[in-house]
Amino acid sequence: PGHWDALRSLAFSPDGKLLVSGANNGIILVWRIDYGPPD
């Protein structure tokens, strides 16, 4: 799991438990910091 294109943006949730990443190919992934792979 992950992006195969260049990342365009990253953002953490206010509680710091999630990281959201967006890539040039339009894919957005939500990563649980305490868990690992994206949902």
Image (tube, helix red, strand yellow):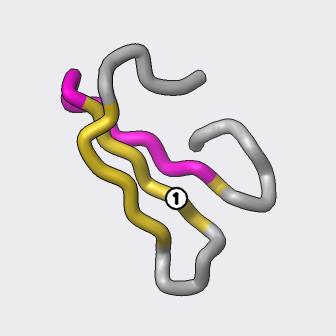
Taking the spot 52% from the left edge, 58% from the top edge, the residue there is 19
Q: Position of residue 9 (x, y in %)?
A: 29, 49
Q: Position of residue 15 (x, y in %)?
A: 58, 84
Is the residue 9 above or below the residue 14 in the image?
Answer: above
Is the residue 11 above or below the residue 37 in the image?
Answer: below
Indicate yes or no whether the magenta region holds residue 25.
Answer: yes
Taking the spot 58% from the left edge, 50% from the top edge, the residue there is 31
Question: Hey, which residue is sitting farthest top in the picture?
Answer: 4
Indicate yes or no whether the magenta region holds residue 15.
Answer: no
Under tag 1, what secondary structure?
strand
38 lies left or right of 21: right
Where is mark 1, residue-wise?
19
Q: Position of residue 12 (x, y in %)?
A: 47, 69
Q: Which residues are magenta?
A: 24-31
Is the residue 35 above or below the residue 14 in the image?
Answer: above
Taking the spot 75% from the left edge, 44% from the top edge, the residue there is 36
32 lies left or right of 30: right
Q: Amino acid at mark 1?
A: Leu
Taking the spot 25% from the left edge, 41% from the top edge, the residue there is 8
15 lies left or right of 10: right
Q: Position of residue 21 (x, y in %)?
A: 40, 46
